[in-house]
Amino acid sequence: MRWQSALAIYLLFWVLSAFLVLPLGMRTAEEAGHATVPGQAESAPAQFAPGRIVLRTTLVSLVLFGAFYLNYRYGWVTAESLDFFN
């Protein structure tokens, strides 16, 4: 696999992981015991920590990409093994 292909696949895993990680650990202002600002949605997070989200996303995407790359390298799961109607 060329490094450009690996980078593109890793970035896809990173974006997928961001959507998986984003709702984890989020609490609304009511749950956190904070007052809401006028005009703020009640479902808005009380504190947004982008650094923590980026770190979690990077760790999850590294694990997922690592599993993908090891499967690519060693061929544990192939297209033939997923053909259930043959």
Image (spheres, rainbow, N blue to C red):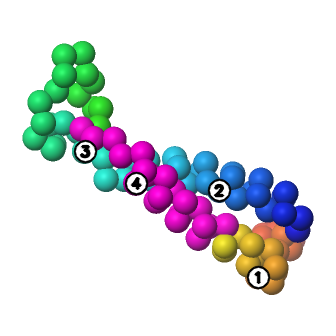
* Figure check: 75 above or below 27: below
Residue 76 as seen in the image, left or right of residue 55: right
Q: Which residue is mark 2?
A: 13
Q: Which residues are magenta?
A: 46-65
Residue 12 as seen in the image, left or right of residue 21: right
The quadrant of the picture occupied by the N terminus is: bottom right
Q: Which residue is mark 1?
A: 76
Q: Which residue is mark 3?
A: 27
Secondary structure, mark 1, is: loop
Q: Position of residue 63 (x, y in %)?
A: 59, 70
Question: Toward which corner of the image does residue 40 lie, by quadrant?
Answer: top left
| Circle 3 or circle 4, nearest the eye | 4
Residue drawn where x is 52% and y is 65% of the image: 59
The quadrant of the picture occupied by the C terminus is: bottom right
Q: Which residue is mark 4?
A: 52
Q: Kindly report the distance in space between the C-alpha atoms of the residues bearing marks 3 and 4.
A: 14 Å
